[in-house]
Image: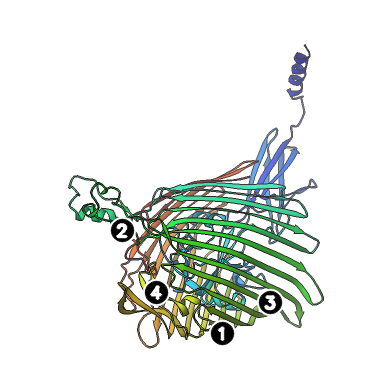
């Protein structure tokens, strides 16, 4: 009886009374132009006195609003915008506020002063948001390989290190949130960078010498990847997270990523985990096994066409991290611990054994000889902190430090052949001083050390300990529309290799740059740099067969410091209407260190010797973006770009493995929920060759992508599809030691879904 009365009362309450105005709810999302949610935006509902702050997903909510038109005032650190919305009665109204494009702030790699890209004297690119999610692949090199002035090495899907303006290895510093990756990826191109691209928040690419702030390893540029493993500010919501699942067709990829963030006013925490598994990748040419099969006369005319497979290119990777930070009135301190484990095949070392040469009854067992694999483990500890106004004359003190316990084992025919270990630390302390007259500046110290060892059959570099210390000073001054930046750095290095005398080196780098603002959206900059780089351990102490590069490599302990004299001219436009970038550079390097193929053989391998000679690297990077449509939040842009680096020896001849000229064009469409794009890139033939180097044919690659975002009160979804190498082109990177053995993947479709909550 009582339940019947309650139902009757509820039914009466649901009947609208005559003249009653039913209230509605208003919810929405604040979204950056890049597609990332804008957390911490203040949303004022004008004429009501109500306001809200967007959470980690950019979400805000107002309840019980009378129906009608309302004005929203959205305030961020960069801008204030006004939007109007009609709130319906007795329901939920949703609005997506996509902020106008803002210039990306550079806070780590290129500037000690948090300058925007438009204000920089040195060329800088930033990738984040939907673009970074779309580009993400198994290696950081492959992820960035289509960026202006950047390509990659290639040792299969797992191992690819960025190449900036023709330079890579120990000349391009790969950083994780401001300090080095501390792996051994610079030692050999088959060694993977121990950073998972799917967990990166943004990537900053600094092109040209960046030794001033980051020292010896930044001789050719910096790739700095930022993440949220150590939170730098209080969270906007007590709990948030994201999950992503993706797969592809070329390698049967299965990837899963999860991250969670939370905390309160004084404390924040972070956790993440990832796993990635792939099979051997399909390539647009017959694989090694199929060539052998055909050569033995087993291919019939009626059989289906071969599907090429790059032998021994499968990958298994997993890892995760825990981090936390404490926040005070004018300071914060945080730490994290992370792991990265990967087991992957090294293409070029898997060979077929003809069945008729195998033992009787074992033909099937010996049909495929197991290739070389790398089993990599890294355990890493990181610290980060900042103190504002720690003492008189100093505006801020920041520090960043990390320690790395790294080991990888190279496995041949099921047994460990060589073990590489690298216990390393990297730390930097930086202070920004109060203005002195018209000048403001920053100074600091950076410490780096490593204990490296290689034991086993391929231990071609002896155990070595190395330490370096660098001190730097950067100053800037503004006057009218001009900004002047000058600085210098002194760095010392000591190397102690087993069986060799200790080596001590000193490098001095200095730079001066000036940028002229041409209105709010355009700038013209010139940067002059004198940078020095001290020889690394493999350049001095290598001695033995290096099967990854299929060479017998010999170092030279008498190598001395390289000196680069570089000039960059940069013209940029970033704002409404047509945008462009034009970079011209000329880099004269005295005593350039490179691997020279001697034309002789030892132990059945070509002999390559580390040697020095003066060299010149010069080239350009050009891009123009033309808006074809911009209306009601929809935009369609046409992009054309090209880049080229020419590397020569002043004594005559070409530098080895220089990337060819390329030119590309594409269309990009963005809307509140949809993004789509198509892009074609033409790579020229590379016939400007070093001694004993083979040419690489030109090719064209066609890529396309589409994604759809679904916004919900408690979760946001992003479904995406990317098609790579749609023409199934046989493509080979001239920068790869394995270009003639390992072409890039064939036609590939990647599909995935990402949820944020």
Tag of residue 721:
none
Q: Position of residue 356 (x, y in %)?
A: 21, 52
Residue 521's image quarter? Answer: bottom right
Front: mark 3 or 2: 2
Q: Is residue 137 visible?
A: no
Q: Position of residue 173 (x, y in %)?
A: 54, 71
| CA distance for labels 2 and 4 | 22 Å
Tag of residue 505:
1
In percent of the image, x 67 and y 77: which residue is there?
445
Residue 282 is left or right of residue 229, and the answer is left
Question: Dot 2: what SS?
Answer: loop
Q: Mark 1 packing: few (<14 Cα in 10 Å), some, or many (20+)?
A: some
The residue identified by callout 4 is 544
Front: mark 3 or 4: 4
Q: Are marks 2 and 4 in contact (CB under 8 Å)?
A: no
Q: Point out the tag, 2 or 4, that comes first from the N-terminus.
A: 2
Q: Is residue 115 above or below residue 55?
A: below
Q: Is residue 110 above or below residue 364?
A: below
| CA distance for labels 1 and 4 | 25 Å
| CA distance for labels 3 and 2 | 52 Å
Tag of residue 444:
3
| CA distance for labels 2 and 1 | 43 Å
The residue identified by callout 2 is 351
Question: Dot 3: what SS?
Answer: strand
Q: Mark 3 packing: few (<14 Cα in 10 Å), some, or many (20+)?
A: some
Q: Position of residue 354 (x, y in %)?
A: 24, 55
Q: Viewer-proximal residue, 324 or 327?
A: 324
Front: mark 1 or 4: 4
């Amino acid at each position: 009886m009582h339940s019947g009365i309650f139902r009757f009362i509820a039914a009466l309450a649901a009947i609208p009374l005559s003249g009653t105005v039913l209230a509605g709810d208003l919810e929405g999302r604040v979204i950056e132009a890049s597609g990332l949610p804008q957390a911490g935006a203040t949303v004022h509902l004008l004429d009501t006195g109500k306001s809200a702050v967007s959470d980690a997903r950019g979400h805000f909510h107002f309840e019980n609003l009378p129906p009608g038109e309302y004005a929203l005032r959205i305030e961020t650190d960069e801008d204030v915008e006004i939007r109007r919305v009609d709130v319906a009665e007795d329901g939920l109204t949703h609005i997506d506020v996509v902020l106008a494009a803002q210039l990306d702030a550079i806070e780590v790699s290129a500037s000690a002063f948090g300058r925007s890209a438009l204000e920089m004297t040195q060329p800088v690119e930033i990738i984040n948001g939907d673009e970074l999610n779309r580009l993400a692949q198994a290696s950081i090199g492959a992820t960035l390989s289509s960026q202006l002035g950047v390509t990659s090495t290639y040792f299969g899907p797992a191992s690819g290190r960025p190449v900036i303006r023709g330079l890579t290895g120990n000349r391009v510093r790969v950083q994780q949130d401001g300090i080095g990756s501390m792996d051994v990826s610079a030692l050999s191109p088959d060694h993977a960078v121990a950073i998972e691209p799917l967990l990166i928040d943004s990537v900053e690419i600094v092109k040209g010498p960046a030794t001033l702030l980051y020292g010896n390893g930044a001789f050719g540029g910096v790739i700095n990847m930022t993440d949220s493993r150590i939170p730098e500010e209080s969270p906007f919501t007590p709990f948030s997270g994201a999950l992503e699942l993706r797969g592809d067709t070329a390698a049967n990829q299965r990837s899963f990523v999860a991250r969670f963030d939370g905390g309160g006013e004084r404390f924040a925490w972070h956790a993440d985990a990832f796993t990635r598994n792939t099979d051997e990748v399909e390539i647009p040419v017959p694989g090694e096994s199929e060539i052998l099969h055909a050569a033995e006369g087993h291919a019939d005319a009626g059989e289906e066409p071969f599907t090429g497979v790059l032998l021994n290119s499968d990958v298994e990777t997993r890892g995760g991290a825990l981090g936390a930070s404490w926040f005070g009135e004018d300071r914060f301190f945080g730490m994290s611990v992370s792991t990265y484990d990967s087991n992957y095949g090294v293409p070029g070392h898997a060979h077929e054994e003809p069945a008729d040469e195998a033992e009787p009854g074992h033909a099937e067992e010996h049909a495929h000889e197991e290739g070389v694999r790398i089993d990599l483990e890294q355990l890493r500890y990181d610290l980060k902190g900042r103190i504002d106004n720690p003492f008189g004359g100093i505006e801020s003190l920041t520090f960043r430090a990390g320690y790395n316990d790294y080991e990888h084992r190279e496995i041949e025919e099921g047994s460990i052949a060589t073990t590489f270990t690298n216990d390393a630390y990297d730390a930097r302390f930086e202070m920004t001083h109060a203005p002195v007259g018209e000048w403001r500046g920053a100074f600091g110290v950076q410490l780096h050390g490593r204990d490296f060892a290689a034991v086993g059959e391929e231990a071609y570099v002896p155990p070595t300990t190395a330490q370096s210390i660098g001190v730097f000073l950067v100053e800037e001054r503004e006057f009218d529309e001009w900004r002047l930046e000058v600085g210098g750095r002194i760095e010392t290095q000591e190397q102690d290799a087993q069986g060799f005398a200790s080596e001590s080196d000193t490098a001095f780098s200095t730079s001066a740059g000036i940028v002229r603002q041409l209105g709010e959206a355009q700038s013209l900059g010139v940067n002059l740099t004198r940078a020095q780089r001290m020889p690394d351990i493999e350049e001095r102490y290598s001695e033995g067969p290096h099967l990854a590069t299929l060479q017998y490599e010999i170092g030279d302990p008498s190598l001395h410091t390289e000196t680069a004299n570089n000039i960059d001219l940069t013209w940029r436009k970033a704002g409404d209407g047509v945008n462009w970038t034009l970079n011209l550079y000329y880099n004269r390097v005295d005593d350039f260190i490179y691997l020279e193929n001697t034309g002789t053989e030892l132990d059945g391998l070509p002999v390559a010797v580390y040697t020095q000679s003066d060299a010149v690297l010069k080239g350009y990077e050009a891009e123009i973006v033309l808006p074809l449509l911009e209306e009601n939040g929809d935009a369609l842009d046409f992009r054309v770009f090209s880049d080229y680096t020419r590397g020569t020896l002043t004594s005559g001849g070409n530098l080895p493995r220089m990337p060819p000229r390329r030119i590309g064009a594409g269309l990009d469409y963005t809307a509140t929920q949809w993004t789509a794009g198509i892009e074609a890139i033409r790579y020229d033939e590379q016939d400007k060759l070093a001694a004993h180097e083979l040419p690489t044919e030109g090719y064209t690659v066609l890529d396309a992508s589409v994604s759809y975002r679904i916004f919900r009160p408690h979760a946001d979804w992003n479904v995406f599809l990317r098609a790579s190498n749609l023409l199934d082109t046989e493509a080979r990177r001239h920068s790869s030691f394995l270009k003639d053995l390992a072409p890039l993947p064939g036609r590939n479709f990647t599909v995935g879904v990402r949820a944020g909550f």
